[in-house]
Amino acid sequence: MSSSRTKAGKRSPNLDTVYSINPDGSRNFLQVAEVKGRWTTRRYIMFYALILVYLLAPWITIGGHPMILIDLPRRAAYLMGATFTNQDFHLFFFVLIGVGIGLFVATTLFGRIWCGFACPQTVFMEGVYRPLERFIEGRRIERMRRNKQGGAGKWVRKVIKHALFLFLSWNLAIAFMCYFIPTRELLHEVPFFKGNMTALVWSLFWTGLLYFDYSWFREQTCLIICPYGRLQSTLVDYDTIIIGYDEKRGEPRHKGVQEGGDCIDCRRCVDVCPTGIDIRNGLQMECIGCTNCIDACDDIMDKIGKPRGLIRFDSSRGFETGKSRLLRPRFFIYGALILAMAGLFVVRATHRDNFQVTVMRSRGLPFSFEGDKIRNLYTMHLQNKSSEHRVYFLSTEPGALSGKEGLEFIIPQPRIDLDPLADVPLTAFAEMPRKSYDLPEDFHFTVTDSASGEVQKIKVRFRGP
Ligand code: SF4
Ligand code: SF4
């Protein structure tokens, strides 16, 4: 492994090593410089809008239920007023595939725009934790100087910072749990969850994980853990809009404006990079598309009186030829797939039954003898999938097993009251004298929802010796 060094002997980013890891394997903790500019402003607007949605969504109710809630104990989920039970789980296949393809389209068109603008890792790191760190420990130069000097000034600030990070992580962990436990119930129970060990352990787990991630692990999550960064190289093509350095214009880089290309080798683009890379080395897997280097370099160009855009959003084709091509066949193919998935989800979700009846396999012999009669036992399972209390009626279809002399149906519980999302096993019997039986025969039970009048037929078979 090679490691390039600046003239001052400092290690600098290259394509062969990960800059945030030292050659001896220890961590090179990055001190990211602050940056201002039009892209940074846009990103902050996006970050705070997303954080607001994240914090408010569990408080908003639609149709008496939270806008988004995955209620694990009740095995149900609520989404924009619709109720889903475990029986509807297959629908989330369409959602997941749709989201996956959506990311493909976004990456194909605009590279890692998701990472730079909307990924929770970036949103909270750059929108909350890093600004707080700067507020307490000061700007990059100040932080580096204080870290080197040591002393009380450094440690007091570090203790305050980590205490606030822990408190923030705990709050974000509780906010996350509001997506799994109704918010108003949850907030009455924090911090000790009234002895609910599961909730307490989860809250501590998420707090610890967020604190570890945002206070120390940081860009390593993007570099080591997230698979999306590795995937991007298969999705990006010659026409994808990426953040890149205009080599034709910038090289040969030269300190000072009088000679060479437009790059004055000031290294501002490196200092502001949260993953510690040098964009001038070309597109790299570590680039999360954060736009810091664009704003940093534009600022330098303004100062030296050169046009902005030495580092900019453009395609590889654009950097080489000056021409870009945004809409390509794969965009339309991915777009059609997303629409198909969204359409399938909407159609399936809006045409679901409000209740579900399934026949359970009975244990042992399918029939028994009661004196000279053959008896069949049927076990069914009824679930109220609606969010309201419902009354159902279980009966047999008119004309079931007609013509069988001495036939009798026994339904111990013909009326069933069910709370929202509740389920219950049902039993029913059919009996007929041996002499009336010749061959197995199918018939139907019916379950009627008294509120909507919806009827579901359940096909079963009468069997005998
Ligand atoms: S900020 Fe711009 S001018 Fe400075 S080193 Fe980076 S590319 Fe060159
Ligand atoms: S190279 Fe530029 S866009 Fe990529 S992560 Fe670094 S600063 Fe952000």
Image (cartoon, rainbow, N blue to C red):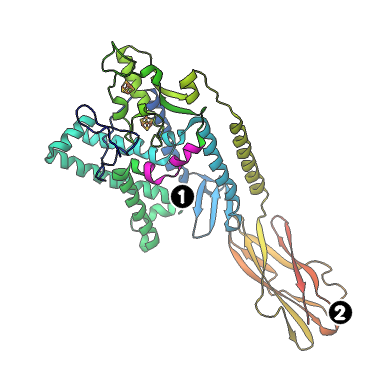
| As drawn, 150 above or below 73 | above
Amino acid residing under circle 1: Tyr
Picture coordinates of residue 183, whole percent (x, y): 44, 50
Instruction: Residue at the far right: name it.
Output: 403
Magenta span covers which residues?
Answer: 221-234
Whether residue 433 is visible, yes or no, is yes
Instruction: Residue at the far left: name it.
Output: 151
Query: From the viewer's perspective, is 112 left or right of 458?
Result: left
Q: Magenta span has 232?
A: yes
Of residue 439 and residue 251, the one placed in the foreground of this image is: 251
- Say which residue label 1 marks: 179
The circle drawn on residue 405 is 2
Picture coordinates of residue 44, whole percent (x, y): 38, 31
Of residue 33 and residue 360, the one placed in the foreground of this image is: 33
Whether residue 196 is visible, yes or no, is no
| Local SS, label 1 | loop
Report the predominant secondary structure element of the magenta stretch: helix
Amino acid residing under circle 2: Glu
| Local SS, label 2 | loop
